[in-house]
Image: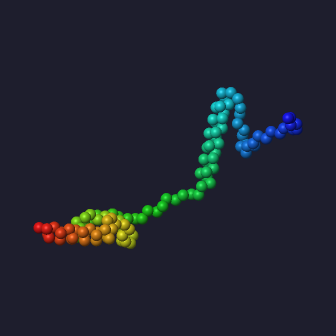
């Protein structure tokens, strides 16, 4: 069975690129590489110029303090804001220091009871 009619092949896709790629030969491969590099640089320049200006985050004006907690005999590191003297961070935390002190006290009582 034969079907007659006009055979329409789909049209090639149209490119929005204003500079078409050259075809044929070794010189064309160099031209393609140059074209790709130019497009890449243009896209990079567009991205940089269109991006919002970025600012560095402001770092707090702080100082580090290192001390020994007497009840636990452990080092404590504190980060303190120099402007207002408030503690920003502490390691170990106050809760951890309390747990260490309680466990140290209980361990001491257990050792005395066994002796």
Q: Quadrant of residue 114?
A: bottom left
Q: Residue furthest left?
A: 115
Residue at (61%, 51%) from the top-left corner? 47
**Is 42 displayed left or right of 11 in the figure?**
left
Question: Residue 38 at x, y = what percent?
Answer: 64, 40
Q: Residue furthest front?
A: 1
Q: Quadrant of residue 108?
A: bottom left
- Observer-nearest residue: 72 or 3? 3
Please tell me whether residue 17 is drawn above or below residue 70 in the rendered image.
above
Question: Residue 103 at x, y = what percent?
Answer: 24, 69
Q: Quadrant of residue 85?
A: bottom left
Residue at (29%, 65%) from the top-left corner? 76
Residue at (61%, 43%) from the top-left corner? 41
Q: Residue furthest top?
A: 25
Question: Residue 113 at x, y = what percent?
Answer: 14, 70
Residue 111 appears in view = yes
Question: Residue 49 at x, y = what percent?
Answer: 61, 52
Quarter the C terminus occupies? bottom left
């Amino acid at each position: 069975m034969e079907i007659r009619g006009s055979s329409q092949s789909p049209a090639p896709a149209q490119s929005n690129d204003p500079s078409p790629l050259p075809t044929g030969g070794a010189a064309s491969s160099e031209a393609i590489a140059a074209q790709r590099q130019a497009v890449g640089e243009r896209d990079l320049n567009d991205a940089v110029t269109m991006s919002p200006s970025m600012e560095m985050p402001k770092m707090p004006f702080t100082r580090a303090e290192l001390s020994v907690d007497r009840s636990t005999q452990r080092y404590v590191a504190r980060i303190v804001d120099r402007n207002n003297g408030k503690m920003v961070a502490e390691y170990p935390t106050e809760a951890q220091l309390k747990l260490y002190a309680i466990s140290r006290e209980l361990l001491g009582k257990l050792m005395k009871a066994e002796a």
